[in-house]
Amino acid sequence: MTDVAGAPADVLHTLFHSDQGGHEQVVLCQDRASGLKAVIALHSTALGPALGGTRFYPYANEAEAVADALNLARGMSYKNAMAGLDHGGGKAVIIGDPERIKSEELLLAYGRFVASLGGRYVTACDVGTYVADMDVVARECHWTTGRSPENGGAGDSSVLTAYGVYQGMRASAQHLWGDPTLRAKRVGIAGVGKVGHHLVEHLVKEGAEVFVTDVREDAVRRITERHRDVIAVKDTDELIRVDGLGIYAPCALGGALNDDTVPVLTAEVVCGAANNQLAHPGVEKDLADRGVLYAPDYVVNAGGVIQVADELHGFDFERCRAKAAKIYDTTLAIFARAKEDGIPPAAAADRIAEQRMHDAAMARRAR
């Protein structure tokens, strides 16, 4: 069923009526000459201009792309709030296979659309986009981060994303086992791409026993050739069933924690870089009922957004690294709040983020 404008009715319901909605603005972008079709979603600007990456992905249809943009933008509001940033949440998705249709012309057209929002949305890299792409976008749009150092940017934000996840793992270990060290702990990483391969480096250096899987054989091979002790498994289904797994780190696309995976998960902790790991509301309770400690994804993977936000003020890597290191303390505070309120950590993180956004909105109205 669609409305008269052709927008799927379920998408409109999500935007205006559901708990997953509440977005301030959604922009549909099209440039026929370059083949660009994109969605820019701004969930909240209560804390400041919306900040979030650009995902380039071959969605099955436009409705799926819109739904993903809405979910990702909402997640960015919570992520930026918990990271202590003066930014709201936004996200953009470009529809199509980046290996086939990505071009300079398309990226420039996309940059013009972002620029037309006048700074309400600040973009960066995400799945399917890279530093070189942001350099192109920035030629048309001042509000672009994740650029190369040669072009005034901070470079690859996956470095600090991985560092933040590592800090989340340390906090989880401290909370659950009374010691932040990960030495000899079995850690399974699903997805060893932009973020996952940096995470492997932290874990190997500390002496963890690392298991990896990825849909791309070359990504796994790059890891195992560099680190002979890292163990590759066939797929995620095998990874989540590894005996004695201490920590499971989903580092690919969202929805990794669902009705099929949670019941068979052997890990005691879930802490990974992927966005939107909980497939639907209620999964966080399923994890808690099984005694699995969940480190909220948007809290532990905030190192990258901390980095790109700093780029707007004159990038300093050590300053950003120090901010990302605080993810350890933030994660511990969430676990403490969850215990105090008798709720799962994901719900505790939501409460803290929502309070910060509410307070900012009230302060703005009072001016």
Image: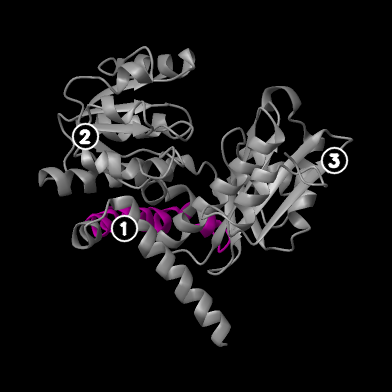
Q: What predominant SS class does the magenta segment belong to?
A: helix
Q: Earlier in the sequence, mark 3 or mark 2?
A: 3
Residue 58, x across and y down, in percent: 66, 28
Q: Are marks 1 and 3 in contact (CB under 8 Å)?
A: no
Check disc 2 and report the residue beneath it.
206
Question: Residue sitting at 36 percent across and 38 percent down?
Answer: 272
> Label 3: few (<14), some or many (≥20) within 10 Å?
some
Looking at the rendered structure, the secondary structure element under dot 3 is strand
Above or below for 179 versus 252: below
Residue 234, x across and y down, in percent: 37, 12
Q: Is residue 156 left or right of residue 112?
A: left
Magenta stretch in the rendered image: 306-335
Residue 181, x across and y down, in percent: 16, 41
Residue 260, x across and y down, in percent: 36, 26
Quarter of image, res 225: top left
C-alpha distance separating marks 2 and 1? 29 Å
Check disc 1 and report the residue beneath it.
348
Above or below for 45 versus 164: below
Q: Is residue 316 visible?
A: no
Q: Earlier in the sequence, mark 1 or mark 3?
A: 3
**Image quarter in which the C terminus is found:** bottom right
Check disc 3 and report the residue beneath it.
31
> Label 1: few (<14), some or many (≥20) within 10 Å?
many
> Label 2: few (<14), some or many (≥20) within 10 Å?
some
C-alpha distance separating marks 3 and 2? 48 Å
| Amino acid of disc 1 | Ala
